[in-house]
């Protein structure tokens, strides 16, 4: 493999060939043949060293796509084994073990509630268990889309509804007065335990049967953005996040707009800097784009691209979603808005119909914003 300077020289040569048009797969093969197996940390260090030597960032960014291919090859091999600790099913199960442990701890305290004891302890455990919502969101936004692509729609139509039942039970239990709390807590704990059974006896075996290693690799990558509960992030999660942020095949392309020209890099940065979350759904109700700002209100994963928007909402919301889309499509509506309280924040959600100048329907835009701080604004703050 040679010394560090040799590897830098080889990598610099590959960057030059990429600039001259060498296909990514060929660059990957050349890298493996001339440098061999190196860790991702070493690749990042090589890239950083080249930056310090004056190699333009845009040139090195081209190699990020090769880095992604190298990472993907390694990841897909590990995704062939469900017992691999990085496999999404293994990670879901590890979280389930922690969820079950907390459920059992709370259950053990339930009898004492009859004597007016242990209520605060149980409430604290239930408050901690609210993190299970992120576990459910990873299923809804990451696992379910791949099952749908494999022709299996049951989980997104049935299990998502059960998720919302659990969300409701959390609210009921935590808002319950002391007299009603034991029954509300018991009902919640029963559903949490039941969900673990449904996942491990039905959902995960079915998913392992229907999804390919490449699907699991993508779910792993997207999970890096979503995060985990009650367990340490798995090995490779930081790398997956870095690659997702730095990889782009059209970063140098220019988008010509009536009021100006923007590179794809500039446009992406602009959209992600807006204080709102954007999601675009085309005229066929297919999700085509969402912004990736650092403080998203709702979880979005790249796996939803190409997904029907009707499958991106829980069953009980489907009627309202369809009514909005139908109104946009037939021209009876041009916008709609809602506002909700979520975790102590005020969330404003707006929908807009997008049309060509001649009126042809292009699709809809969802704009979501946390307006908690805006509602508190008083007086003025001027530039001068």
Image (spheres, rainbow, N blue to C red):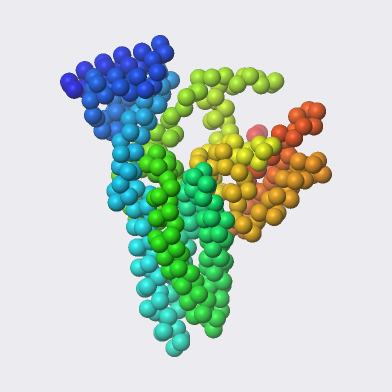
The residue at the point 48 percent across, 69 percent down is 191
Image: 129 above or below 63: below
Quadrant position of residue 245? top left
Q: Nearer the viewer, residue 319 or 345?
A: 319
The residue at the point 41 percent across, 55 percent down is 204
Q: Nearer the viewer, residue 290 or 36?
A: 36
**Residue 277 location in percent, x, y?**
59, 42
Q: Nearer the viewer, residue 308 or 60?
A: 308
The residue at the point 54 percent across, 55 percent down is 154
Image: 251 above or below 271: above
Residue 219 in the figure: left or right of residue 7: right
**Residue 220 location in percent, x, y?**
39, 44
Q: Where, quadrant-wise, is the N terminus in this rendering?
A: top left
Residue 126 in view in this figure: no
The residue at the point 66 percent across, 54 percent down is 318
Quadrant position of residue 284? top right
Residue 44 in the figure: left or right of residue 6: right
Residue 78 in view in this figure: yes
Quadrant position of residue 11? top left
**Residue 173 location in percent, x, y?**
53, 73
**Residue 192 location in percent, x, y?**
46, 67
Image: 218 above or below 2: below
Residue 194 in the figure: left or right of residue 234: right
Q: Where, quadrant-wise, is the C terminus in this rendering?
A: top right
Residue furthest out toward the bottom: 115
Number of numbered discs visible in the structure rendering? 0
Residue furthest out toward the left: 2
């Amino acid at each position: 493999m040679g010394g560090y300077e040799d590897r830098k020289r080889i990598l610099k040569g590959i960057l030059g060939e990429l600039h001259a048009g060498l296909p990514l797969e060929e660059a990957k093969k050349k890298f493996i043949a001339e440098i061999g197996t190196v860790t991702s940390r070493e690749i990042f260090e090589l890239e950083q060293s080249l930056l310090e030597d004056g190699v333009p960032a845009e040139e090195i960014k081209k190699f990020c796509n090769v880095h992604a291919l190298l990472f993907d090859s390694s990841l897909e091999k590990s995704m062939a084994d469900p017992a691999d600790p990085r496999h999404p099913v293994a990670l879901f199960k590890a979280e389930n073990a922690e969820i079950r442990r907390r459920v059992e701890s709370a259950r053990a305290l339930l009898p004492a509630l009859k004597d007016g004891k242990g209520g605060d302890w149980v409430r604290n455990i239930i408050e901690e268990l609210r993190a299970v919502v992120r576990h459910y969101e990873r299923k809804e936004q990451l696992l379910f889309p791949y099952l749908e692509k494999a022709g299996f729609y049951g989980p997104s139509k049935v299990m998502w509804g059960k998720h919302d039942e659990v969300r409701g039970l959390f609210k009921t239990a935590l808002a319950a007065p002391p007299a009603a709390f034991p029954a509300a807590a018991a009902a919640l704990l029963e559903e949490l335990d039941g969900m673990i059974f449904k996942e491990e006896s039905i959902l995960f075996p079915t998913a392992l049967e229907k999804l390919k290693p490449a699907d699991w690799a993508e779910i792993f990558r997207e999970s890096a953005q979503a995060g985990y509960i009650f367990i340490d992030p798995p090995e490779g999660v930081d790398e997956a996040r870095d690659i997702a942020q730095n990889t782009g095949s059209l970063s140098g392309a220019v988008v010509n707009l009536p009021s100006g020209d923007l590179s794809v890099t500039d446009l992406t940065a602009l959209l992600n800097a807006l204080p709102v979350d954007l999601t675009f759904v085309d005229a066929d109700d297919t999700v085509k784009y969402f912004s990736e700002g650092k403080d998203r209100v709702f979880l979005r994963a790249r796996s939803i691209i190409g997904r029907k928007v009707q499958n991106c909402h829980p069953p009980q919301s489907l009627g309202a979603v369809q009514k909005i889309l139908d109104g946009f499509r037939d021209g009876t509506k041009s916008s709609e808005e809602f506002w909700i309280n979520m975790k102590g924040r005020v969330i404003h959600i707006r929908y807009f119909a997008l049309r060509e100048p001649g009126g042809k329907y292009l699709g809809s835009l969802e704009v979501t914003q946390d307006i908690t701080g805006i509602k508190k604004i008083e007086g003025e703050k001027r530039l001068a």
